[in-house]
Image (cartoon, helix red, strand yellow):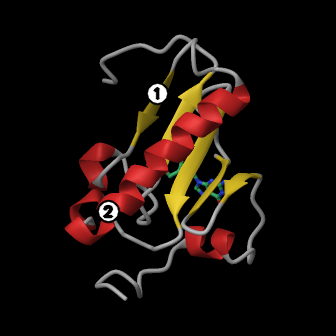
Amino acid sequence: TNETAGNTTLFTKIINREIPADIVYEDEHALAFRDINPQAPVHVLIIPKKPIATINDITEDDRELVGHLYVVAAKLAVQFGFAKAGYRVVMNCNEDGGQSVYHIHLHLLAGVTMGWPPF
Ligand code: 5GP
């Protein structure tokens, strides 16, 4: 129960298995699945099961949950074998940040040497 609990997106449908996804990890609080339009050889989205709309909606109550998303990212990096080579984890916020789905998600990108800055 929170101010964004009523915010449902297609990611809620993925959590509820109402639409298919290539799920690579699941636990009580988080789900990870392959991005439908990958921007790198490996592109996984890691989401909390709790539907928080944007980074702006994260509260102190979500501290453990949001931290957990990074723990999942690090686990997947080891599991997929790119932890040592390196990877990128990013979360977009609102229009200028490039957010298109309003249910927070970490992008886990790997399998290529990435450039910086992103624009
Ligand atoms: P954002 O732009 O909000 O940071 O990232 C949203 C991501 O969700 C995009 O990379 C987009 O390709 C991905 N996406 C959108 N719809 C679907 C879908 O139905 N299934 C999957 N697996 N990914 C999706």
Report the amino acid beneath label 2: Thr
Disc 2 CB within 8 Å of nearest ligand 1 atom: no
Against 6, residue 45 (above or below) is above
Q: Residue at x 38, y 45 (%)?
A: 91
Q: x, y (%) of residue 53?
A: 36, 69
Asked if one can make out residue 70 in the rendered structure from this viewpoint, the answer is yes
Residue at the spot of label 2: 54
Disc 1 CB within 8 Å of nearest ligand 1 atom: no
Q: Secondary structure at mark 2?
A: loop
Q: Residue at x 69, y 78 (%)?
A: 16
**Res 83 → quadrant:** top right
The foreground one among 69 and 55 is 69
Label annotation for residue 88: 1
- For label 1, count other residues whose C-alpha is less than 10 Å away and answer few (under 14), some (14-19) or many (20+): some
Q: x, y (%) of residue 90?
A: 40, 38
Q: Secondary structure at mark 1?
A: strand
Asked if one can make out residue 59 in the rendered structure from this viewpoint, the answer is no
Q: x, y (%) of residue 1?
A: 37, 89
Against 59, residue 42 (above or below) is above
Q: Work out which quarter of the rendered image holds the C terminus and state it.
A: top left
Q: Is residue 24 found left or right of 58 in the rendered image?
A: right
Question: Pointer 1 and pointer 2: residues touching (CB < 8 Å)?
Answer: no
Q: Residue at x 64, y 28 (%)?
A: 78
